[in-house]
Amino acid sequence: MSTSNTTLTVGSTEAIAGDIIYVPVSISDNTGIAGFDLKLNYDSTYLTPLSIERGDVLADGDFSTNLD
């Protein structure tokens, strides 16, 4: 049996009101993920999500969001 050291990292950034920012979410030491759900919590007083973009890890898989 192998031990997995898979790590999910959410980047940080700084901005001023009105800026559009990108917050990267990355997976390292991935030995093969069959599927996952990701829920990001944020304070809607300060942040309005505009879009979610698929990265390289999800290039060939199913991808859906529930961004309203």
Image (cartoon, grey):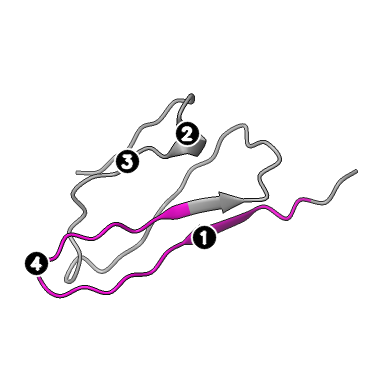
Mark 3: amino acid: Glu
Q: Secondary structure at mark 3?
A: loop
Residue plotted at (25% across, 69% down): 43
Q: Which residue is mark 3?
A: 53
Q: Which residue is mark 4?
A: 18
Question: Any magenta on residue 12?
Answer: yes
Give the quadrant of residue 63: top left
Contact flag, marks 4 and 3 (Cβ < 8 Å)? no
Q: CA distance from mark 3 to mark 2?
A: 10 Å
Q: Say left or right for 19 vs 57.
A: left
Contact flag, marks 2 and 1 (Cβ < 8 Å)? no
Q: Secondary structure at mark 2?
A: helix
Question: Any magenta on residue 31?
Answer: no
Give the quadrant of residue 15: bottom left
Q: Position of residue 8 (x, y in %)?
A: 56, 56
Q: Which residue is mark 2?
A: 58
Residue plotted at (48% across, 43% down): 37
Residue plotted at (29% across, 44% down): 52
Q: CA distance from mark 2 to mark 1?
A: 15 Å
Q: Residues within 10 Å of mark 2 (few under 14, many from 20)?
A: few
Q: Total of numbered circles in the picture?
A: 4
Q: Position of residue 68 (x, y in %)?
A: 19, 44
Name of the residue lying farthest toward the right: 1
Q: Earlier in the sequence, mark 3 or mark 1?
A: 1
Magenta segment range?
A: 4-25
Q: CA distance from mark 3 to mark 1?
A: 16 Å
Q: Residues within 10 Å of mark 4 (few under 14, many from 20)?
A: few
Contact flag, marks 3 and 2 (Cβ < 8 Å)? no
Q: Which residue is mark 1?
A: 9
Mark 4: amino acid: Gly
Q: CA distance from mark 4 to mark 3?
A: 20 Å
